[in-house]
Amino acid sequence: MRIRHEVVEIDVENKNVKVRNLEENKDFRESWDELLIATGASPIVPEIADINAKGIFALSSLQSGIDVFNYIEKHKPAKAVIIGGGYIGIEMAEAFLDRSMEVSLLDMAPQVMISMDQDMAGIIPSYMEKEGVKVYLEEKLVEFEADEDGKIKSVITDKHHLKADIVILGMGIKPNSELAAAAGIKLGAKDAIHVSKRLETSVPNIWAAGDCAESFHLLTEKQVHIALGTLANKYGQVAGVNISDGNAVFPDVLGTAITKFRDLEISRTGLSEKEAKDLNIEIKTTVIDASTLSGYFPGTGKMSVKLIVEKESGRILGGQIVGASKSAKRIDTIATAITASMTAQHLADLDLAYAPPFSPVWDPVQIAARTL
Amino acid sequence: MRIRHEVVEIDVENKNVKVRNLEENKDFRESWDELLIATGASPIVPEIADINAKGIFALSSLQSGIDVFNYIEKHKPAKAVIIGGGYIGIEMAEAFLDRSMEVSLLDMAPQVMISMDQDMAGIIPSYMEKEGVKVYLEEKLVEFEADEDGKIKSVITDKHHLKADIVILGMGIKPNSELAAAAGIKLGAKDAIHVSKRLETSVPNIWAAGDCAESFHLLTEKQVHIALGTLANKYGQVAGVNISDGNAVFPDVLGTAITKFRDLEISRTGLSEKEAKDLNIEIKTTVIDASTLSGYFPGTGKMSVKLIVEKESGRILGGQIVGASKSAKRIDTIATAITASMTAQHLADLDLAYAPPFSPVWDPVQIAARTL
């Protein structure tokens, strides 16, 4: 059996780490020439009453998914409450609904999917409600209530008292940067480890990669903390090349992301209207409704596309898609156009693929571009 | 009832057209200040024995589709032979197969989909054969044979004698430019009407748009004739703006196209390897196999991506995709990257959307880019 170990200290001066053998609670030191910190991120877990009740789960690792699965198999929960309407919350709502549970989802914000704008995100809760999820917005988690066996019994919010047999915490994540901070390594955006584009930290010979590290936003050149699988994979590659004396640069990010709830697909890239306004960028926006395929083609569905462009230049800054099957992956066209500094006119002029089983004659992202 | 008319002559000198009332066979003249020629294209129909047999169809208009439908309803053909393995041929093979016909498809080339390279197009016939279509390549149509009622009986090729109750001609199209040529208007690529980027012909105040007109290839800046619905739609818009004293430019084209045969999706953009070599461009190419979604996700399928890049600069020149459901529309990412003069490295660096129901962590087009 593999013995579990944990690094408990980084000694920058002497170039070693203190490692704890968790089975025997014994420490030893391991020296390094180059150190890569890839400690990931952890779900945010609020310090409230009965947070440790059985049946409350946060998701981060493969094991945490297996734990939820096993709990369901064993206890057959009937009522699920999900805290948070982000990717995790929405995807878990789908999974629980598919297991015939009564599902409630709550978010303290007036919308789900906080990385999107209200006008687009607003499509999601009504669809979820139609499928059977009870959605509570602008509702804050106050505390939990466990029964005499220590099992979760209710979720208490500022407005309701919700019965629950299982609870998922989808309240966001925080980078695991405490070890780095304790060693004097500089932290940055949202307490992620500050890195250069080559993924060097503030301390020579120490690198950071993945969900614990910062990245640069392609449009603002500001440092951001965006924890996504695509980025984690690229981080690993770039860190590997640079640590082995190569020279690779971590590409700037747009926060391109995609998810779905049953037949509703959801994606976003670049700056939202809200983010652009927070940066005092003067913008124009459009939201259009189109069909996913040619209108007369069997299986066609509805989709909405939002584009955000810089007012004066017309340069595309962001896009959001919510719609039926085959809609959301079109966000890649927008992400590519943003990276290439294209304007809405450039996007409308692109020679994209059309045939009735795939798209209307004008691809919906181009229909949006044309209205600008 | 609407009376059918046809323009039979363009008088450039006197700025009028001679119009024939086809019901009464009477001519009259209609004058113009600005003239738009939008005569479209026609299917190529070879002059061979029994070409006029009942049951032989070429497809161009909505009506020609209705004619095929009505013929099938009335005569219940059992054996269909399709001449030509392009978009029309492949799509009609699917439609006939779905009506339980015995379907044969022949092409004089050693491959179907001549706008793609043999290595990618080669995936298609074996899939079609598996679904039940008999595919004959490097086989030339010689003549037809009709029965005593004038109905199609057989298709005679240079190698076989194929029984047929219905025949589709999918042998390509030619621009309807005779009227323009007769008026002294200059023709260009493949006898399409030569136009500027504003869609002016060689004669002042005469414009041409749609399948009868040329366009500029984005990569070669050479004039080409590509007849596709997306372009026809843009042609109309640009011509409309310019004729009404506006100033619009017809965007350069990449020949981006997409089709499918049952669950096999097919798309292409930019230059094929063959086209690049014909232009004496030094290139590198790659073909990769990937899964359409995360490998473990239900419903994932196989897809192949080919990229063609300029050898020295790494600039992307073309892409081709053949694969399962949800694969081919990714060609839009490649088309956008080509338009933006991106290299394979730029493509690999893009922040594209990933979630298991949509894509592997690295989008297949990026997997291809990385191998370069």
Image (spheres, coloured by chain):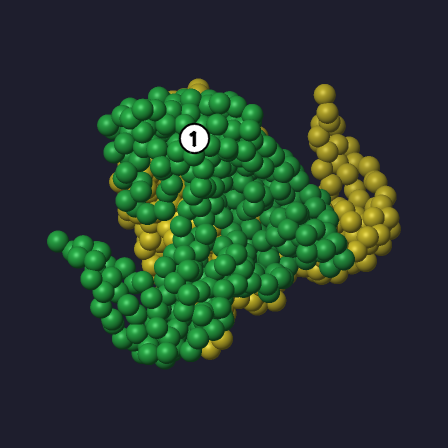
Chain colours: A green, B yellow
Question: Can you identify the residue that label 1 sits on?
Answer: A144
Q: Is residue B89 above or below residue A193?
A: above
Question: As drawn, which residue projects farthest toward the left?
Answer: A1
Left or right: A194 as drawn, with respect to A307:
left
Given the image, what chain letter belongs to the residue carrying mark 1? A
Report the front residue among A113 and A299: A113
Residue at the spot 49% in from the left edge and 55% down from the top edge: A226
Residue at the spot 69% in from the left edge and 43% down from the top edge: A286
* Crowd class of label 1 (few under 14; some 14 to 19; many from 20; radius 10 Å): many
Image coordinates for residue A215, horizontal then vertical, percent: 50, 63
The answer to whether residue A102 is seen in the rendering is yes
The answer to whether residue B307 is seen in the rendering is no
Left or right: A150 as drawn, with respect to B176:
left
Report the front residue among B20 and B250: B250
Q: Is residue B144 above or below residue B346?
A: above
Residue at the spot 64% in from the left edge and 37% down from the top edge: A119
Indicate the quadrant where residue B363 lies.
Answer: bottom left
Image coordinates for residue A356, horizontal then vertical, percent: 52, 38
Image coordinates for residue A3, horizontal then vertical, percent: 17, 56
Image coordinates for residue A64, horizontal then vertical, percent: 31, 42
Report the front residue among A156 and B55: A156
Residue at the spot 52% in from the left edge and 63% down from the top edge: A188
